[in-house]
Amino acid sequence: MWRHLASNTITFMIVGLAGAAGVIAWGVNEYSGEGPLETAMCLRVEPGTNMRAVSARLEEQGAIGSAPIFRIGAEYSEKAGQLKAGSHLIPEQSSMEEILDIVTRGGASTCGTEILYKIGVNAVAAEVRELDPATSSYTELAEFDPTAEGVEIPAEYETMRERADTRYRISMAEGVTSWQVVQALNAIDTLDGDVEEIPAEGSLAPDSYEIAPGTQVAAVLERMEAAQAAILAETWENRAEDLPLETPEEALILASIVEKETGVAAERPQVASVFVNRLRQGMPLQTDPTVIYGITEGKGVLGRGLRRSELQAETPWNTYVINGLPPTPIANPGRAAIQAALNPASTDYVFFVADGTGGHAFSETLAEHNSNVAKWREIEAQRAAGN
């Protein structure tokens, strides 16, 4: 009898262990396997929130199948106390393990609301926008010009600035001048410490920069300068052979001219080839943007056409009068323009003119150029008549 009883006990223990192993295996699969979330969601974690509250909310919103298993996974991985406040983008079908990593990793908020400060050639704007996690696209909530006097600040802007998880970014467009950048940064109330000295023209990299409230304007400018210096050094190292450019600074000057001459990314190498060919042949560059810079000195937009007297005036930047490159860049060029200046297309073009589509018609001879100019004049006349 005792032998029979012992046998049954052992059997029960084996079954029990097998059952426990099965439960553990199921739990591990639930934790690391594909989750039930059908559409990406934005999970906001308030400061002071604990893992129990977060796991319950995730379960309620259909992101996880079991709040207890999520918490057990957090405890086992020693992440239960590492929850980070903020707005976290949870992709569809994320596993519990992946979600735990997202909410404990830290860093900038990945969804929710952001305030984007856009520094453009013609305008500056502060835009309050919210990411729709289902479409990964932003919806604009409010916009205003922070540099305008007497501008009414939208209530949405003030509200979002009070939230701890609001993300802040500065977006600097290609072709903006250093003066424009400084004026814009000084006007952004999220930043501290106005700057009076204008960085060298061309020395700032157009890009998107993450900031935090209280960041110094000087610190943002330093990041922009470091980024541009790195881009220029890398591109100069990989430049084409036999260019009529002696230094990286000359490359930056040429790149800024290319940047201002075309808004069509695909034709930057052809535009660069025109100026490189002109430099090789000793021809004046004859480009209007340099003349405009000589008038404005980069302090804003001219806002009108050039006068004949201005095209004939002697300034260091008037490339109708001087030979070769002007003494400084005329704007801050982006990476693509720098790349085009140092690796131009292989062409014999020495002329180009607008073609009516937003791009340019290129030519090798003056006769071809005059024909293209005549076509452009016809387009201009037709447009004027249509107005």
Image: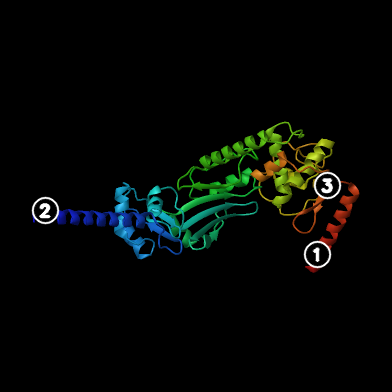
Mark 3 vs 1, N-terminal side: 3
Distance between the alpha carbons at the discs numbered 2 and 1 = 108 Å
Disc number lying in front (2 or 1):
2
Local SS, label 2: helix
- Label count reads 3
Is the C-beta separation of discs 3 and 1 under 8 Å? no
Q: On the rendered image, what quadrant is the C terminus found in?
A: bottom right
| Colour convention of the picture | rainbow
Where residue 209 appears, as percent x and y from the top left, is 53, 47
- Give the percent coordinates (x, y) of residue 136: 52, 60
Question: Mark 3 or mark 1: which is in front?
Answer: 3
Looking at the image, tell me whether mark 2 or mark 1 is earlier in sequence order.
2
- Looking at the picture, how far across and down is residue 261, in whole percent? 74, 48
Label 1: which secondary element = helix
Q: CA distance from mark 2 to mark 3?
A: 104 Å
Which comes sooner in the sequence, label 2 or label 3? 2
Q: As displayed, is residue 212 above or below residue 142?
A: above
Q: Amino acid at mark 2?
A: Arg
Residue 26, above or below 247: below
Q: Which mark is residue 3?
A: 2
**Please, what secondary structure does the residue beneath circle 3 have?**
strand
From the image, tell me which residue sits under label 1: 384
Q: Which residue is mark 3?
A: 351
State the residue in front, 59 or 147.
59
Query: Going by the image, does 332 lie left or right of 161?
Result: right
Q: Nearer the viewer, mark 2 or mark 3?
A: 2
